[in-house]
Image (cartoon, grey):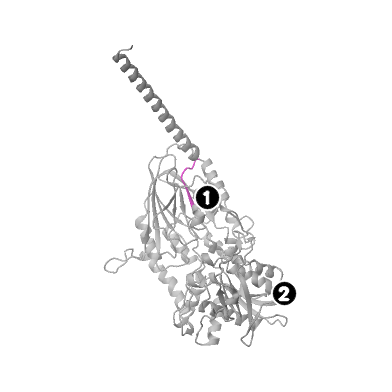
Amino acid sequence: MKSRSGRSSIYKFAIVMILIVLLTKMSTDAESGVAGAEKARGTQAAGTKDDFQLRILHTNDTHAHLDLIARRITAIKQLRTPNTLLLDAGDVFAGTPYFTQYEGLADLWFMNAAGYDGMTFGNHEFDRGTGTLRPFIQGASFPFVSANITYKDDPNLGPLLVDRAGAQGEPGHIYPSIIRVINGERVGIIGLTTPEAAALSSPGQHLVFREAMEAARHAVAALQAIGVNKIIALTHHGLAADQKLADTVPGIDIIVGGHSHTRLAAPAVRHADREPTLIVQAGEHGTDLGQLDVQFNGLGVVTNWSGKLIALDETKPDGTPLWPGEPASAAKLKDFAMALEQVKGMVVGNTKVTLDGEHAHVRTRETNLGNLIADGMLDKIKSLVHEPDAEGYIAIQNSGNIRASIRRGPITLGNLLMVMPFSNKITALKMTGDEIIAALENGVSGVEQREGRFPQVAGMRFYYDSSKQGERVDAVTHIREAGHRIVKVQLLREDGSYSNIKPDALYVVATNTFMARGGDFYTSMKRASDAGRRYKLELLDYEVISGYLGKIGRVRAGVEGRIVDLRGVQMARFHETGKKK
């Protein structure tokens, strides 16, 4: 039998051995964790700091809203530090008369004054083609980034492309990615543009928009290969796509986004338990300036962060602006504005009723403003196009081209420019009844998401059922799955009666050139256009509607049952007026 002291020694020895094993395992696990981080991020580059601080000031989807631009520049100047990047996530173009008149160059003056470090392209940057975009790029004091667009065959943008990773980024040029050096640290910035720009805008035939995720993987890998371990994705494809990007493409630390007009009051954080990716977006129309402060360790992993939106229209208790306009910018804005006032103030009509162009309304149902615009388009096309063999005349206008309401009273040209800021052109197509039904099927397939393809119409009415499957399309307008929502389409006759549309008959369809080229996924219109059934008409939309207002006098437009959502109710339960029995 062993003594008590002997047994005690054995117990102590066992405890010591257990502790040694545990400490060895903890050390191995720690080394494994570091190795895993190094594998994902690359080893710490020589000279990198374990507490590198970076501030990002960011904007997106300004859409030529310049009323608060002088305040923005004041805020930027006060908030900028030596470790600051100033970035824009696209859609500077289109939205107010400033763009109609100056084609982005007014916005560019202020962006240059603010000292932007980079911008990616939004879909609206291509609204007037690459010929209009080229001087905007060339006049910029900063570079542009977008890794998923092929530019080389475009005569306007191809010469501005520098197709290599790791460039410092020269002003007035386009890169897949750039590097900015902040306090001795290299920060990589890649750009991504929604592939739907091919359908949502007018980029022309030479640009190719590629799938964003694969382009992002390639761009991130190219930066990592040259030792860059702090990477920002500057994107214009919406919050949902940003979330997918964060979850599927490793190595991205921060996503500065746009396109969905999302107002993120604080950063959205993905996989915070491992290597976090932060997503920020600053709403729309220049109302807010985004601020994000982050800290990186030596491996390029974000360890601390804070972010917020700065309301540029905020006032002090005495009513004065919290961010007073920077004097030089305020003076320049006044110069730009004065040149517009005489044109914008011209009265072109008068309305007895408020004309409803609210985003949530015009993209989901018939509105009186949608009716007025479609009526004006139809009236103009009827006066110009004479087709004896046509079964009838109709108009289809996408609601994405209706951007504001008009209050009761005088209607100015400025009002029309706010409603239709893209300077689209009115044209006409000869389409079969089947092609028209296909166009309407596309139009109602995005109603749940309030997509801009929702149709406003004239010379017809249609019934659809939103409870049925809508048409599903991919980023480049190829139909993946047919829709089954359109129930009945009827033509308005001269005597005020309606008759069912004939599938094989030909109709003259007033629309805009954006849709005629297949924009907003109107592929049946593009087919008609490609088949040579498009009339050579190039009429500015706001000029057409201005002329129509002068013709009809005071506006009393209302909702007439042109668009009826059955919502699962059988057609037989509705009267021909569109009302339930």
Pick out the residue farthest to the front: 1
- The residue drawn where x is 67% and y is 81% is 392
Q: Looking at the image, can residue 240 be seen?
A: yes
Do we see residue 169 in this rendering?
A: no
Tell me if 386 is positioned left or right of 42 in this view.
right
Which residue in the structure is indicated by mark 1? Answer: 177
Nearer-N-terminus badge (2/1): 1
Mark 2 and 1 residues: CB-CB less than 8 Å, in contact? no
Residue at 52%, 80% (x, y): give it.
Answer: 559
> Mark 2 belongs to which amino acid?
Asp
Residue in front for this viewpoint, 206 or 25:
25
Question: Which residue is more in the foreground, 364 or 376?
Answer: 364
Q: Could you say which is closer to the camera, residue 309 or residue 47?
A: 309
Q: Which residues are magenta?
A: 227-233
Measured Cα–Cα span from mark 2 to mark 1: 51 Å
Q: Is residue 213 above or below residue 398?
A: above
Disc ID at residue 504: 2
Q: Is residue 350 above or below residue 444?
A: below
Magenta span has 97?
no
Residue lying farthest to the top in this orientation:
1
Q: Amino acid at mark 1?
A: Ser
Quadrant of residue 5 within the rendered picture: top left
Q: Residue 341 at x, y = what percent?
A: 44, 77
What x and y, as percent, mark residue 329? 39, 65
Which residue sits furthest left?
Answer: 318
Circle 1 crowding by C-alpha within 10 Å: few under 14, some 14–19, many from 20: many
Residue 164 image point, x, y percent: 56, 47
